[in-house]
């Protein structure tokens, strides 16, 4: 796609597609519940379709009717042995969460994914699962997928996770559903808590205290209705765009504002952004609001510590935003970005440098000295959806033209991204 510098402000309103993390969990937990769950505003992105395909292969009937998904769950012990390898595509959430579920089954399974998934670290889930008694091995013995899992009886543990990762936490808690006693996970900082909220909504006994989440084994999960909120990680691109393009004013409707995900809003506020939350409400188990965003003159900030997990997927577009504002932005404690769909730290630094930004990579983040003009260029997405969309947004304020190469990866999380961008641009 070729993006040209915008000469007019962004205007209008938009409902961004459903939250990716919540869509995955809705399919997984309703498959483990007894009865039919109706899911509205499910994200039809490639990652969530991978989750659907895995559960279909384990005997779960999933129907799509009138824009809704109906999952005919078979209860905690109702999955059947897959006849084929479970393909998780590009999805880390599918791979890691499903591994927790598979560890406690009475059958064996094999999980794989694309080249990116096959190079992402899985030891982070293999270690705690093994200490629960799971049989899980990396087929190529490199601690990455493909994984072979022989389901077995599991022990409840208290896992002190070295990283704040919702994928690790959720994997262990899901295995805990099949354990002999309570399972707990303590994280260094609180990561997104959609698993805790939704499992409890389905009837599991989940408790939380500070950065510890616990689950009791063998709950009776019951089918329910799930309304998936708009994805704040998708909203982030338009939040950044409206703040950067002079004169813009947009309304993003039904955006999930769970405090474990809303770091981008807090960072933008710290930078001087004019963002108002309207119609704040709770939809099922998640807080939601409409966001009114007006162009603002921003200044640099520091992003670190407990804030990082609450905006981990938004850091690429925050780096773009920081490049356009006055002053220096420092991002620390974000080393996890190196093991996402791509090495997002290195790529943001190298590509923003090519666009003329004064940016320096550090061991665990970056330093961006904002305010220099951006120049359009060709940017390779490296097949990472968040890199592709972040540079499409950079292209709106860069001189000349910005070409996003290999951008079909946007389908992973936001298949109608360009259509929505166009809607706000005309
Ligand atoms: C996710 C958690 C985050 C995030 C990913 C989705 C989830 O990963 O980056 O896009 O749905 O649990 P980590 O938990 O590994 O940080």
Image (cartoon, rainbow, N blue to C red):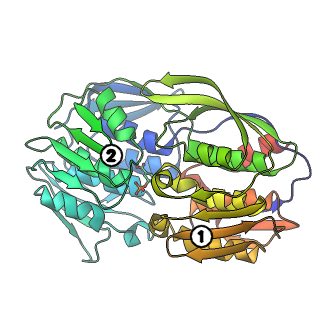
Q: Which quadrant is the C terminus positioned in?
A: top right
Q: Residue furthest right?
A: 7
User: Which of these two is toward me, 377 or 281?
Assistant: 281
Residue 244 in the image, given as x and y percentages of width and height: 79, 52
Report the side of 197 relative to 298 (left or right). Answer: left
Q: Residue at x 78, y 60 (%)?
A: 326
Q: Quadrant of residue 92?
A: bottom left
Residue 230 in the image, given as x and y percentages of width and height: 57, 36
- Above or below, 169 relative to 197: below
Residue named by callout 1: 366
User: Which of these two is toward me, 360 or 108?
Assistant: 360
Q: Quadrant of residue 130?
A: bottom left
* Marking on residue 37: none
Q: Residue at x 63, y 70 (%)?
A: 367
- Above or below, 286 relative to 164: above
Report the side of 391 relative to 19 (left or right). Answer: right
Visible in this render: residue 198? yes
Real-space Cα separation, disc 2 to disc 1, in angstroms: 26 Å
Q: Residue at x 88, y 43 (%)?
A: 247
Name the element at disc 1. Answer: strand
Decide if ligand 1 comes within 8 Å of the CB at mark 2. no
Residue named by callout 2: 211
Name the element at disc 2. Answer: loop
């Amino acid at each position: 796609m070729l993006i040209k510098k915008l000469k007019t402000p962004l205007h209008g309103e938009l409902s961004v597609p459903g939250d990716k993390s919540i869509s995955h969990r809705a399919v997984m937990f309703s498959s483990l519940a007894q009865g039919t769950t109706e899911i509205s505003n499910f994200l039809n992105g490639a990652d969530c379709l991978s989750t659907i395909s895995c559960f279909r292969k384990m005997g779960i009937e999933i129907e799509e009717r009138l824009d809704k998904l109906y999952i005919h769950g078979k209860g905690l012990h109702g999955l059947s042995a897959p006849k084929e390898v479970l393909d998780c595509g590009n999805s880390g959430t599918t791979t890691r969460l499903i591994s927790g579920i598979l560890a406690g089954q009475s059958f064996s399974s094999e999980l794989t994914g694309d080249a990116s998934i096959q190079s992402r670290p899985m030891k982070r889930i293999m270690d705690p699962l093994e200490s629960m008694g799971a049989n899980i091995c990396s087929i190529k013995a490199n601690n990455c997928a493909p994984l072979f899992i022989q389901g077995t009886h599991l022990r409840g543990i208290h896992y002190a996770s070295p990283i704040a990762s919702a994928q690790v936490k959720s994997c262990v808690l899901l295995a805990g559903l099949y354990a002999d006693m309570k399972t707990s996970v303590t994280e260094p900082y609180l990561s997104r808590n959609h698993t805790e909220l939704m499992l409890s909504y389905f009837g599991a006994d989940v408790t939380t205290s500070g950065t510890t989440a616990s689950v009791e084994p063998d709950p009776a999960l019951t089918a329910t209705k799930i309304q998936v909120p708009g994805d704040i990680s998708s909203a982030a691109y338009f939040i950044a765009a409206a703040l950067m393009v002079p004169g813009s004013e947009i309304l993003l409707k039904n955006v999930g504002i769970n405090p474990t995900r809303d770091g981008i809003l807090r960072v933008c506020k710290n930078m001087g952004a004019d963002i108002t939350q309207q119609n704040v409400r709770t939809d099922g188990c998640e807080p939601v609001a409409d966001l009114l965003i007006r162009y603002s003159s921003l200044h640099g900030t520091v992003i670190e510590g407990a804030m990082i997990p609450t905006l981990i997927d938004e850091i690429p577009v925050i780096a773009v935003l920081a490049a356009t504002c006055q002053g220096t932005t420092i991002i620390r404690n974000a080393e996890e970005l190196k093991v996402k769909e791509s090495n997002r730290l290195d790529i943001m630094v190298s590509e923003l440098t090519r666009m003329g930004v004064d940016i320096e990579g550090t061991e665990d983040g970056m330093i961006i000295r904002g305010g220099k003009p951006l120049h359009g260029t060709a940017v390779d997405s490296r097949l990472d959806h968040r890199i592709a969309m972040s540079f499409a947004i950079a292209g709106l304020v860069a001189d000349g033209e910005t070409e996003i190469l290999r951008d079909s990866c946007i389908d992973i999380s936001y298949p109608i991204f360009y259509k929505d961008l166009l809607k706000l641009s005309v």
